Amino acid sequence: MFDFFKRKRRAAKTSSPPWRERLAAGLARSREKLAGALGGVFARRKLDAATLEELETALISADVGVAATQHLLDDLSRALEARRRRRRSEGAAQGSARRPPRARSSSRS
């Protein structure tokens, strides 16, 4: 008359893993994807535009999300730019301190 009991039987036949196990398996796959991709990105010595693009692809393909990926890349780009500016200013300060003063020539033609 009513199909109350059929549902229980069907569920018993096709026993799928509990929700928690499925979640853990999905997170493990995402972690493996992300770790593999990040290992390849950070194996490079130089962080440039191509490396940032590779990082973006790795984060999005690992289901990090667009907003989180953009936030991470913006922070990383700002930190890299600040480091470059600091190195340039330190290099310029050291370069000017190392240069001997120019000798002025007394003969003018």
Image (cartoon, helix red, strand yellow):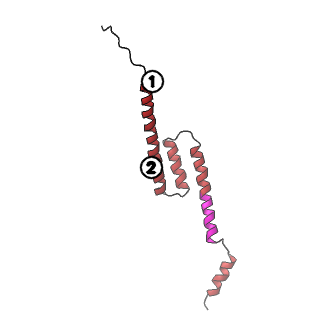
Q: For the residue marked with disc 1, what is the amino acid?
A: Arg
Q: For the residue marked with disc 2, what is the amino acid?
A: Asp
- Examine the rendered structure and indicate whether residue 3 appears above or below residue 92: below
> Which residue does the image show at 51% across and 42% down from the upper left?
50
Relative image position of residue 45 (x, y in whole percent): 56, 39
Give the camera-side residue of 78 and 19. Answer: 78
Name, please, the residue furthest toward the left.
109
Give the camera-side residue of 57 and 3. Answer: 57
Name, please, the residue furthest toward the right.
13
Instruction: State how far apart marks 2 and 1 are (Cα).
Output: 36 Å
The quadrant of the image that shows the C terminus is top left
- Examine the rendered structure and indicate whether residue 109 appears above or below residue 86: above
Query: Does the magenta portion include 104?
Result: no
Q: Residue 17, located in which quarter of the rendered image? A: bottom right
Query: Does the magenta portion include 27?
Result: yes
What residue is pinned by disc 2?
A: 74
Where disc 2 sits, the SS reads helix
> Which residue does the image show at 65% across and 78% down from the upper left?
11
Relative image position of residue 52 (x, y in whole percent): 50, 45
The numbered disc on residue 6 is none
Relative image position of residue 9 (x, y in whole percent): 67, 82
Q: Which residues are magenta?
A: 17-30
Give the camera-side residue of 7 and 83. Answer: 83
> Which residue does the image show at 68% across and 79% down from the upper left?
12
What residue is pinned by disc 1?
A: 98
Relative image position of residue 88 (x, y in whole percent): 44, 34
